[in-house]
Amino acid sequence: QMALSYFQESLILRTMHVGKHSLDVASLHFNMGVVYDDLEQHDQAISRYHESLRIRLDQMKKATSTAPELEDSVLLTLKCMGHVYKLTGDLDNAICCYVKALEMVNQKFSTLREHADEWSKMGLRLGLAVPVPTVIFADMKSSTDTTSWKTHFQIMNKKELCHVFEPRLTKRRSRSTASKLKRELSKIHSIIIDLVQERKQKSLNTESGSLRSNKLPGSSSMLLASLPSTFKAGGDAFEAALMRSSFSLGRMRLEQMRYEEAADYLETALRSKWVLDPGSSSDSDSDFSLKSLSTRKHQATRLEEDNPEEGQLYYSLGICNAAMDDHERAVRCFLTAMRYLRRSLRRVDSLEVARVLFDCATSHYYLCNFEQSVSLYEECLRILKTYDSPNEDDEENTPSANNDSKSKTFRRGVTLYCLVMAKAAIDFDAEASNLLNEAQMLLSSSNDQIILAYMEFLTGLFLHHAASQVPVRLRAITRISSTGLSLNDGLSWNEMCQSALNLLDQVKNECWFDPMEGVEDSDEVRHLPLSGHICFIKGQVYELIDSVDQALNSYVDAANFYRIACGDENMYVASVLHRMGLICSLRTEFHALGYFNEALSIRKNLLGGNDHLVAETLYSSAIVLARLNRYEASMERYHEALRIQMAVSQDSNEVARTLAGMGICHYNNKAFDLALTCLEGTVKIRKYRVSRLTDSAELVELYGEECSLGSDFYNLGNVHMQMGDYAQAMQCFIQSRDLRWCHVGSGTVTKILEKYFSETTVDEDELLGLAHCLHNIGVMFDIKKEYKRSLPHYEEALAIKNAIAGFSDKDSMSLVNKVDRDENEALVLQSLHKDHEFPRINKATLSASVTRQKIAGVYVKQRKYDHALFHFSHALRIQRQVLGKDHFRVGSILTSMGNALRRTSTPSETAIMCYNESLRISRLRFGQNHVSVASALFDIGNLHDSNQDFSQAMNYYQRALSVYKQKYSQQLRQRLCSGLEKPNSSTDSETPGTEVLSTGDEIVVAGDASGPEKQIRDQYALVTKALRNAKRQDLISRGEGTNCIGDTNDAWLTFEILFFRFVEMLSTYVVDPAQTVMLNTIESSRRRIESAAAHAIIGATDALDYQFQLLLQE
């Protein structure tokens, strides 16, 4: 009360001296209103506030420039009045006061805003949300279960991880004032929303539907008259205030990334808009909706940031939903916004529509609708290009015009980047590469290093893709330029790969997530997916340039990043593990099998057991299991893969490939009947696919199918040869040869090799395949003993293999006839003692040694031993370098060389050296009691026998005889006692009854080779006879007489021979017939029981008898 008395006295004095319309008097009225407010005398407080506001508003009208202090005092008075009206329940006047205060703050805030065009205003002045570049694996896109990989794609590429592009063309003004005004606006908007909601609630609670009035008499009309015309009293006015405040507060929450609150406020604004204009909520083109549209045409001709239309509201809701990764709802909001915008007065191709198109395309990208995303980005880019041309009125080169021009340039560059990214998700093409170059030029002056790093990543991705598309045979001559792949200008293939690695390293320096930091604590978590993609692409590039260790390290890092981003089981990790398995399968099969098993487990859990990606991993792991000699496990996976693939298509490339793999697996395990069935099915499918593509324009696919068909014919020929069907084998080899001859160019082998050395466009794989076919055709003639026809085929095959292996001219066939015996001996000794290192070892190196071995064998049969030794020596040199000095095939060549040396005039010491080295290898490889050791001992003994060193010969013969006697007795014991299974002994050395294929496999020649039992028996008899002869010759050489009985050892040896013959006759004429009868009886009983089981009910007794028969059979 004392304060009021002082204020009253001061008011009287100031009114007398400065007049009742002065600002000092207005301040006293305001202070007295504050005191009355504290005393809860609201009528007097409103009266004083009202008078103070009237005076200050009059002063503002009279002033040419309004002082900031006067505006602040008016604003404070309005807020105080609104507060008192709120306390008294006069919600209408309270809302009026806060709306007026809001308009004043908005006016001040608008002066601090930077200039913005319709694009930025439509985008709520937010930066462009640019997606992080990503990689979608080809096997993921081809999966039948698209839901799984799309889910992991969306987990990997969350909207919150995107980069916000905001070009800073000028320095920002001081942000302290703007932030203070934003906080003030937020408070006022919140109060207005609460007041309008409270007013609506009270209106609903009244029976009559009208608000009960608590207005102070005489004050409302004067207040409303003093407010500007933008707000009119009435229900629509209050609903409009709710809409504006909700929209503005929603925008502020969007800037603060409080998306759920923003969505709530924006939905409130949208509902208010429907109340204000019911026709706006109609999605149809009805008369009511069109009438509503026509009534709004004269109201606004441009976008108002604080007075939203339907398009702005729906767009803002779309932004909120996209930020919360609800892109399906976001797309619906964006499409609705575009419909409203294009139905309004503005042009169809406006900047507002372009901004909505951009964000809608981004949401489609996150939904993996890449085709739709590309379409919308292209439409947005088309609109932006129409606004890039300078206006005719803007003739002056002002800073503002320059900034606008740069902003448009950056905007178009970002849109181009997003378009390229969406196109890359579908496929890499030249158009996308050109668009990326254009985007880099447009953004080259930008200071946003992140977006520049993103484009460097895409450039590296395009370079890797281009390098991977170049066939191996064309890599030396292929170049890439801005126009695409060429043979003249641009980067070479190696430079492409190195440039890709350099670009990825630059991106790594700018965008990298350190896995040692916690995901929650790291500010660079948004770089986590990109870090995984960088490692994966680097691994693929390293794989292209054959840097296996670096590729594996990169893949391991990629898998770790993907696990952090998406969890332990996701499609990205499965694909990386599969690729790691493919790499390791060429080196360490056990590691490869582990990777394949882990990938298979993940894919089965995510995709189920019937997806083609599961079949792909099953097929790859089956190959590894076959190499590990796990035949049953390999075939189990082959069959499972085939089941999945045949459910999709029975004549697909995958089915043919799996059947071929099964056939090769059966072949390696001597199951030739099954191999024949699988490979015949493969050939049938390949023939059908080739016939279907013959008249089409798919030349690349046709070429690939013909290459596969040629390989399948070759494998089928090997199977026929192993089964003794030489006519069919020859036919298959000829068909394979003809296909491959067409692929490498017609003409003689000499012309083909000239083309191979000069043009480097000959398919090296097909050329080597041709050599394999020629070799095996030579084997066929060799079996028929047509050596004059086999030798030319061997020589042509060797010429091709030498060319591919890179051997020099000194290894050529033309030198064979020029080599004399002394040079031959030196060459043999050199191959025995000197280590040779070849400049490179490739797929043709070892195969060339096999062909040389076969040529040497033909010369041995023709008794051209010097020629044979020439080839044996070169084959030995190669195999010692490639296979190692202790490999059993090296021992086989050494034995053959020793046999050839015995038939020449070369000193026997060289032959003994070959035999001794072969003996050492056999002992090391197989142990002391193996038939290959006995064979080597016999050869050495035979050599000493021919040199009349009978004591040494007898020593070696006796050692060989002890091994053969042990093996022979084991066979007879097994045959006599068990009888149901034949012993399965085999030698590892090449015998006269075997032929070697170009692949190194041995085949048994039908009619020439004996079974293992007969081989052991014959060798035993041969060594026994040689030992007796050596003893007799030794006695004669010493001058001692011989008799028919010999010594005790001879008598015992004679007894052993007779005993072994007796046991063999007993087995042949007694045991074997009895076993045959028993097996036939068991088989007959089994068939009768099975026949009865099909027509009768079997009782317990019958079942027991049946079990007994099964046990007996076992």
Image (cartoon, rainbow, N blue to C red):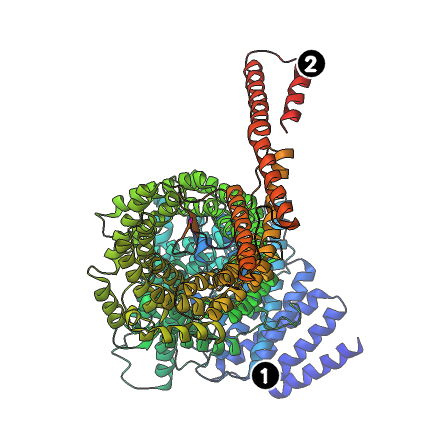
Element carrying mark 1: helix
Q: Is residue 421 one of those drawn in magenta?
A: no
Q: Residue at x 51, y 54 (%)?
A: 988
Span colored in magenta: 987-993
Classify mark 1: residues with Cα within 10 Å, few (<14), some (14-19) or many (20+): few
Q: Which is nearer the eye, 856 or 687?
A: 856
Where in the figure is residue 49, as x and y percent of width and height?
64, 72
Where in the figure is residue 553, as x and y percent of width and height?
56, 69
Q: Which is nearer the eye, 412 or 682?
A: 682
Q: Mark 2 belongs to which amino acid?
A: Thr
Q: Which is nearer the eye, 1104 or 698?
A: 1104
Q: Residue at x 27, y 68 (%)?
A: 756
- Residue 69, label in figure: 1
Quadrant into which the C terminus falls: top right
Against 631, residue 1037 (above or below) is: below
- Mark 2, residue position: 1101
Whether residue 183 is visible to the viewer of this picture, yes or no, is yes
Q: Which is nearer the eye, 421 or 95?
A: 421
Extreme left residue here? 747
